Structure formats: C-alpha cells, structure tokens
Amino acid sequence: MEDFTSEAGKIQKEIDKISSIAPLDQLQIKYLGRNGIINNLLKDIKNVPAEEKKDYGQKLNELKSSIGRLIETKKQELLEKSGTEQTVDITLPGKPYLHGTLHPITYAIEEISRIFEKIGFVRMSYPEVEWEYYSFEALNMPKGHPARDDFETFYIDVPEHAKLAKMVLTPHTSSGQVREMERVRKTLPAGRQAPIRMINIAKCYRRNWDATHAPMFYQFEGMVVDRGINITHLKGTIDYFAKNFFGPDREIRLRPHHFQFTEPSFETDISCNVCGGTGTVNGKKCRVCKSGWLELGGSGMIHPNVLRAGGIDPDVYTGWAFGFGPERCLMMKLGLSEIRDLYSGDIRFLKQF
Ligand code: DAH
C-alpha cells in the first residue's frame, strides 16, 4: 500500500521532466496501457490476502485515476504552449487585409466635380429636403401647372409655408438654381448680380423604379449666368465635359425640347461609342443607341422668369443650365444596363470597379 503512494510521487516527477507530447504518450502506455504497470498490478490481486483485497483494489484504482489526471493536465499544458508558439511564427506569410474602395457612383461624382472645377465652376450641394417654391414656383412652374406632374414628387407631411409652400424631397437639382442666384448676389457689390458658375451635385427623389430609374438618384446641374452668355457657351461646355469624361472622340448635339425653366430648351445627346455615332454596326442598326446618339439629359437658356425669381435682371444678364445624371453617365461609360446593380450593395458587382 505504501508503495502505491510513493509510486504516485515518482510518476509526478517523471511527468515534470517531460516537455513534448510523444514521451507523454509513451508514459501513458507504460502505466495505463493494456499491459501497463497498473493492469499488471490488478492481475496480482489474486495473490493478495482476502482481507486486504478490497483495500488493495480501491487504492490501485485511485492511483490509476490520479495518473490519468496528471497526464491529462500535462497534455493540455503542452498543447496550449505549442498553440502560442505557432501564432508567433514570424516566418508565416501575413494575412492580406480586405480593403474597400469608394463606390463607383462616388468616383463618378468626384470625376465630374474635378472636370468642372478645372474651368472655374463652384461645387455646391443644395438641400435634399426642399421647399416646393425652389423646386417649382421659382422655376416658372406655378401651382397647378401640369409640368409638375413630370417630376413624380414625394411630399413631406409638415405644415405648409406661406410663401415657400409644401416641403418635398427635391425631385431635381434645378431647385439649386435660384438658391445659388440668391447666394451669389449677397457676395457681390451692390448693383452686380453675376457672374455665376455653379455645379450642383445632389441626391434627388422621384416615385420611379425600373431598369434605368431609381427612386433616389443623383443629378449634376451646371449653371452659368453673366452678361452676354449664349448657347455657344452651353454647347462648348457640354462638349468639354463629354470629351473629358467619356473620351476625346465623342461628339455632342442639342435637340429642341421643352422645359418650363429654360427657353429655348434642349435634350442633349452624345455620340454612341459602340457604333461611333453612325447608328449602324456591320450594316445592322446599333443595338445600344439605334440612332447614333445617346441622351445625356436636359439643358437650355435660363427662362427670364427664373432669373427674375433669383433677383437677376434678364435684360442685363443671360444664362444657361443643364441637368444630367452621374449614374446615367457612369452606366454609359461602363456599358451597364441596370441602375439597380449600382444600388444593390452587392459586393460581387461592386468589387469589379
Ligand atoms: N431638371 C430637369 C429634370 O430633372 C433637367 C433639366 C433640364 C435641367 C433642363 C436643366 C435644364 O438645368 O436646363 O428632368
């Protein structure tokens, strides 16, 4: 019996010396294996006097489980140690960090800004939550005018303002035109009402949702007001933008149209890059544009009533404006057909850009 107690102490010492798993496994087999020391001692029980048998068996079993515990504890200790050693293995190659990029629409907006800032335009962002006055009345669309229906506007449920009327989610960046006229006038010496060179890039909202329209989208609105401004300045500026954003071989054209806030008004087209503006590819109608031209957006000479609303005398000053969509420009540049892909947030789509 005393042998058993001293045996446990000896085994503990043996275990203390061990510093890796393999010798520990061998030790386990030596003591606890089928032909190990414990089992052999158990077989010896037949030689033990009858009155000592019970005590002998009990002590032996206690020894067996305490050896088991000692080995197990040591094993955990060794495993933990080898684990920490691995994490500081400085020879392993580092894990690459996933890093994001700006959204393609953000890139497009930054590029558009840069193109216009280079020729002296001031970048503005006018409110997304706007008064009806700036969205419509000030733009020559009085209350009840049918042209307002084109803008499929979201209304905000707040009390109406006596002059500015209801609140809306701005349906177009043209709402920044009169705001900018008011802002610039305040910065100029008395008696002067211009020059203005603005690029207003902001979010707009309309009740629309299909392949090329999202209910929230961006527009960029260019506006120039000064003495002697005419259509050639409008055309030259859009041509400069088209060549810088889309490429030097692109052409633009103005096509007569109607907007309440410009007179004359135009739809602005850019030559198609698929058919080179010819409308045909290998003798067949171009599938992208069908006519050689793609629509960029609206433009025109600012209506005298709009200048008046901004406190500018239309007998002294003239101006032009245009309103295009960065998403549409980006889609035309990259050859995308679904605006909803741009707004899906799907990383598999976005990481291509
Ligand atoms: N605001 C118009 C729209 O959202 C686009 C537009 C047309 C803007 C003509 C202009 C313009 O500045 O002159 O459909």
Image (cartoon, rainbow, N blue to C red):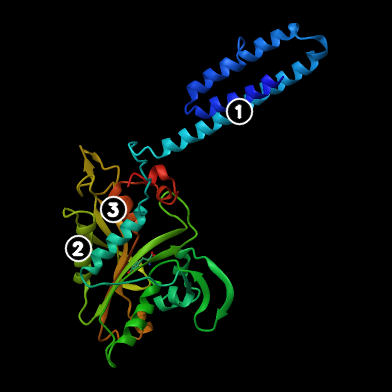
- Give the residue type at disc 3: Leu
In the picture of the structure, the residue carrying the numbered disc 1 is 70
Q: CA distance from mark 2 to mark 3?
A: 17 Å
Dot 2: within a 10 Å radius of its alpha carbon, few (fewer than 14), some, or many (20 or more) residues? some
Ligand 1 quarter of the rendering: bottom left
Tag 1–tag 3 contact (CB < 8 Å): no
Rendered view: 274 above or below 33: below
Q: Nearer the viewer, residue 153 or 9?
A: 9
Q: Which residue occupies the extreme left position in the image?
A: 249
Which of the two discs, 2 and 1, labels the residue nearer the N terminus?
A: 1
Rendered view: 280 above or below 271: above
Determine if the C-beta at disc 1 is less than 8 A from ligand 1: no
Q: Is residue 75 left or right of residue 201?
A: right
Q: Which residue occupies the extreme bottom position in the image?
A: 190
User: Where does the image place residue 291, in percent across and percent down from the top left?
Assistant: 26, 49
Dot 3: within a 10 Å radius of its alpha carbon, few (fewer than 14), some, or many (20 or more) residues? some
Which of the two discs, 2 and 3, labels the residue nearer the N terminus?
A: 2
In the picture of the structure, the residue carrying the numbered disc 3 is 294
Residue at position x 27%, y 89% in the image: 192
Q: CA distance from mark 1 to mark 3?
A: 81 Å
Q: Secondary structure at mark 2?
A: helix
Q: Nearer the viewer, residue 5 or 343?
A: 5
Q: CA distance from mark 2 to mark 1?
A: 82 Å
Which of the two discs, 1 and 3, labels the residue nearer the N terminus?
A: 1
User: Where does the image place residue 231, in percent across and percent down from the top left?
Assistant: 22, 71
